[in-house]
Amino acid sequence: MNKYAFTFCGTDVEFLSSGALFWPARKLLCVSDLHLGRSERYARLAGALLPPYETRDTLARLEAAMAQVEPQVVVCLGDSFDDAAAEDGLDDEMRLWLTRLMAGRRWIWIEGNHDPGPVEIGGSHMAELPDPPLTFRHIAREGAAGEVSGHYHPKARVTGKARPCLIYDSDRIIMPAFGTYTGGLRTWDAALSNLMRPEAVAILTGPKPIPMPMPR
């Protein structure tokens, strides 16, 4: 089974093993923190040479997740590009690939702290997306309910290995980073543990999503 189904704020959703979230009733696929163009940004700003394959790998995994559920709406929860110039740094092949994925469906770029401005590649750019009973935004807000956010790149450890994970409680979902070159914040970090209720659950990515009490 390569997905984990659960109910959030009265809404049935599915967490895919890839790290994407699917809302079947809306045919909506949500991913967070793609950080496209990270290796290009490192080279541009720091002269650091990383293998320039992360955009290709991220788009391939995104395409596979989309093929799994065939969404009509795709929501990218911010930090989709590693900085404001990273979109311009995409080579023609990656730009065409992304354009092909966007074709024929509603595509929404939520602004993040890395990419606060609109992109020229297409789609809609929004500060946040309210779609009751859920609201999609980049960074969690205290006191929010029905919130789906990203930003923190949560990770948890099982059998000695830390894996990206989704965490959720009755009020909020925090998504894992979908991008290939992304680090992560352990769930016991105060930035996450102070946001989540004591009963919060972590669902680890991998061949089979694994639910567990959120490690603190």
Image (cartoon, helix red, strand yellow):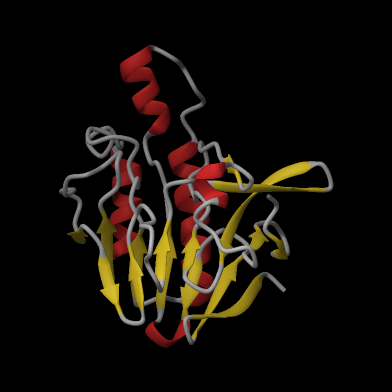
The residue nearer to you, when weighing 167 against 105, is 167
Q: Is residue 118 left or right of residue 199?
A: left
Determine the residue positioned at 39% across, 56% down.
140
Q: Is residue 143 left or right of residue 5?
A: left
Count of numbered marks: 0
Give the image location of residue 106, x and y in percent.
26, 71
Residue, far top: 47
Give the image location of residue 4, x and y in percent.
65, 73
The residue nearer to you, when weighing 6 against 34, is 6
Q: Is residue 107 left or right of residue 159?
A: left
Determine the residue positioned at 37% across, 14% down.
46
- Asked if 44 appears above or below 113 in the picture, the reply is above
Determine the residue positioned at 36% across, 52% down.
139
Q: Is residue 30 visible?
A: yes
Give the image location of residue 117, x and y in percent.
17, 45
Q: Quadrant of residue 76?
A: bottom left
Residue, far right: 159
Determine the residue positioned at 48% across, 87% down.
10
- Asked if 14 appears above or below 187 in the picture, the reply is below
Q: Is residue 104 visible?
A: no
